[in-house]
Image (tube, grey):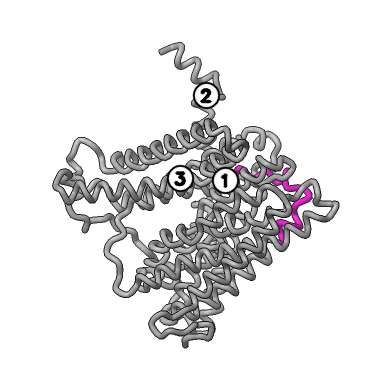
Amino acid sequence: MTNLLSMSTSDYNGTWAFIAQMGILFGAVIIANILRRKIPFIRKSLLPSAVIGGMLILLLKLIPPVKAFINEGFMEIVAYHCLGLGFISMTLKDSGKKQPGQGMTIFKTGATVVNTYLIQVIVGMLITIPLSLLAVYKEKLFPGAGVLLAFGFGQGPGQALNNGVILQTEHPYFEGANFGLAIATCGFFVACLVGVVYLNIAKKKGKIKNIGGDFIDETDENAKDIIPVSQSIDRLTMQIALVFAIYAISYLFLFGLEKLCAAATFLGNFGKTISDLFYGFNFLIGTVFAILAKQIIKLLKKSNAMKHTYTDNYLLNRISGLVFDVMILAATAAIDFNKLEGLWLPLILVCAIGSVVSFIYLKFVCKRLYPTYEEEAFVSLFGMLTGTASTGTILLREIDPEFKTPASYNMVMQSMPAILFGFPIMLLVGYLKVGLVESVITTGICAVLFIAFNLFTMFDFKNKRFMFKNKK
């Protein structure tokens, strides 16, 4: 025991390094939460405590000794794994019964989400491709860097990091990880600050009657046959065990795929490209295995082989909330602004123009798809597609605190059709990373997909007509 203690306290690169880095993250979010509650301006901004905490760490990193103490590589690893764990915990939740008549709306919401990704890719690429041809950016900016707008804004810091690393691995001169994380951080500010301004303007125009309201998250008391508190294993322990077991299975799948690709010598370097791409989409693999796990649990319950319901929606919500907060903290803390030197103009242009285009497109769609709850649908989708699902939920709670409109249900249920529609975009990342020509071709493909998916989204199957004109 003495040797173990002396080794633990002296070897900072071991377990204590992990404890210290996590202590930085959680310490920052505690301070951020205090600031958010005590300072009216920060509270009214609706910025999540995790984002404020990440910004506090960034400010502290301006002090050289503090910057040296914070392990940016560790922060990137934490953000990467939290993305996969968060998606698994969300997928394991029981989504309940589908609301009547919502099937096509959910499907079109998924298509709208992907359409926003596509227009963000197109806008981002139309900015970075021409800039990359200029002498000043030739050795700094990868032509296809604009694709990171869709991942940073559309899917958040975890995916921005994953795909930034994919581009950076192929083109080391481009700081892909930092560029993607910076876009994601800007997205949080756009989601919250623009969202708040929009809500107040809409209120003055009489479009919204009430802004604000406390939302209390209750435990899942209505779940039938839930695992009893008195059983030998705690409910929370069971939820964590399920999430990590599924994530471990996901890793084994990825590890096996990597070995298969390495063994298939006829694939050459393309085999490594495939395995790297799948590792980049760890969250998607985890989601697939979580869906399989849910189906197995349902079969066991149906056959009476399982007596209790071992998944708890309330606790799974808490787990996903925890890991997504940590992901946001770690991803923001991982940004090294020194490495973005010379990339500020592309970053500002991509974020500014991307924000305007995303706003206009979602306003156009929401007027037509959700005529009875346009404002609720817009703020939830805009918050989600510039920040994350949590920022979309925060904005939605301001005008629909009890989630009475279908907007929140659409946000939850759209993920599966969005994965279906969005899968081609994920594959294109592995293609465009090759170079300039591939980036141009990818932009063209995204433009074609955008037109095709919008024709589907805007078509009213009931009345056999397109809804390009406002339904109101």
Which quarter of the figure is the N terminus placed in? Answer: top left
Residue 335 in magenta stretch:
yes
Real-space Cα separation, disc 3 to disc 1, in angstroms: 11 Å
Q: What is the secondary structure assignment of the residue under circle 1?
A: helix
Q: Amino acid at mark 3?
A: Gly
Task: Quadrant for residue 270, please give it.
Answer: top right
Query: Mark 3 or mark 2, which has the lower sequence index?
Result: 2
Q: Is residue 437 left or right of residue 412?
A: right
Give the residue drawn at x 40%, y 72%: 105
Range shown magenta: 331-349
User: What is the crowding at mark 3: few (fewer than 14 residues within 10 Å), some, or many (at least 20)?
Assistant: many
Residue 30 seen in this snapshot: no
Give the residue drawn at x 48%, y 73%: 456
Q: Amino acid at mark 2?
A: Gly
Q: What is the secondary structure assignment of the residue under circle 3?
A: helix
Query: Mark 1 or mark 2, which has the lower sequence index?
Result: 2
| Badge number at residue 84 | 3
Query: Mark 3 or mark 1, which has the lower sequence index?
Result: 3
User: Residue 115, how many percent across, how many down?
Assistant: 54, 67
The residue wearing badge 1 is 162
Give the residue drawn at x 47%, y 88%: 472
The residue wearing badge 2 is 14
Outermost residue toward the front in this view? 266
Asked if the residues shown at circle 1 and circle 2 are in contact, with their CB atoms under 8 angstroms apart, the answer is no
Outermost residue toward the right in this view? 135
Real-space Cα separation, disc 3 to disc 2, in angstroms: 24 Å
Q: Is residue 374 left or right of residue 160?
A: left
Asked if the residues shown at circle 3 and circle 1 are in contact, with their CB atoms under 8 angstroms apart, the answer is no
User: Residue 42, how many percent across, how many down?
Assistant: 56, 60
Residue 414 seen in this snapshot: yes
Give the residue drawn at x 47%, y 38%: 254
